[in-house]
Each structure stands twice: as C-alpha cells, then as structure tokens.
Image (cartoon, rainbow, N blue to C red):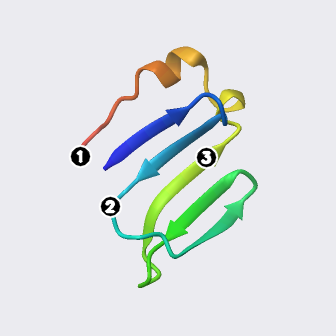
Amino acid sequence: MRVKVDKKSDALYFRLDENKIEGSEEVRPGIILDFDKNDQVVGIEFLHISSRATPEELSSIQFQTV
C-alpha cells in the first residue's frame, strides 16, 4: 500500500495495490474510488484535504493494526 499527499492538488491518495485502474467513481463529494478490471477498489482519493486535516495531521500519518 502507498499513501501520497499531493499539496499542489490538495489531495490524499491511498493506493491499495498496483492493478491497472480501469475506472473511477466519485462516491461522495471529494471522495473518488479507483477500480480495476474486476471492479475491485485499488485506490481512494480524498480531495480538498487541507479543509479536512491540519498540516500537522498530514505530516504524520499513523497506522493502527487491530
């Protein structure tokens, strides 16, 4: 999995695997899912991230495994 913060486009992107993206759908305003040929989600993009999180929160992303 890869996580990318793009300050220029004000977006946060989670890439779940490396399958080719065949389509995308905006499921809520500013939230876009990317799908592979089997209709499985391979990426999630959050737009306008600066209005959703502070710069401090974006500079340090924590992962929790349960």
Looking at the picture, how far across and down is residue 46, in whole percent? Answer: 61, 46
Q: Is residue 34 above or below residue 56?
A: below
Q: Tell me where residue 15 appears, x and y as whole percent.
A: 41, 53
Residue sitting at x 61%, y 39% = 11
Q: As shown in the figure, which amino acid type bears the numbered disc 2? A: Asp
Query: Dot 2 corresponds to which residue?
Result: 17
Q: Is residue 65 left or right of residue 51?
A: left
Badge 1 element:
loop
**For this view, does 49 lie left or right of residue 15?**
right
In this view, the mark in front (3 or 2): 2
Find numbered disc 2 in the image and state the secondary structure of the residue it sits on. Answer: loop
Mark 1 → mark 3, Cα distance in angstroms:
24 Å
Q: Position of residue 31 (x, y in %)?
A: 65, 54
Spatial CA span between label 2 and label 1 = 21 Å
Find residue 19 and report its image quarter.
Answer: bottom left
N-terminal-most mark, 3 or 2:
2
Residue at the spot of label 1:
66
**Dot 2 surroundings within 10 Å: few (below 14), some, or many (20 or more)?**
few
Spatial CA span between label 3 and label 2: 17 Å
Label 1 vs label 3, nearer the camera: 3
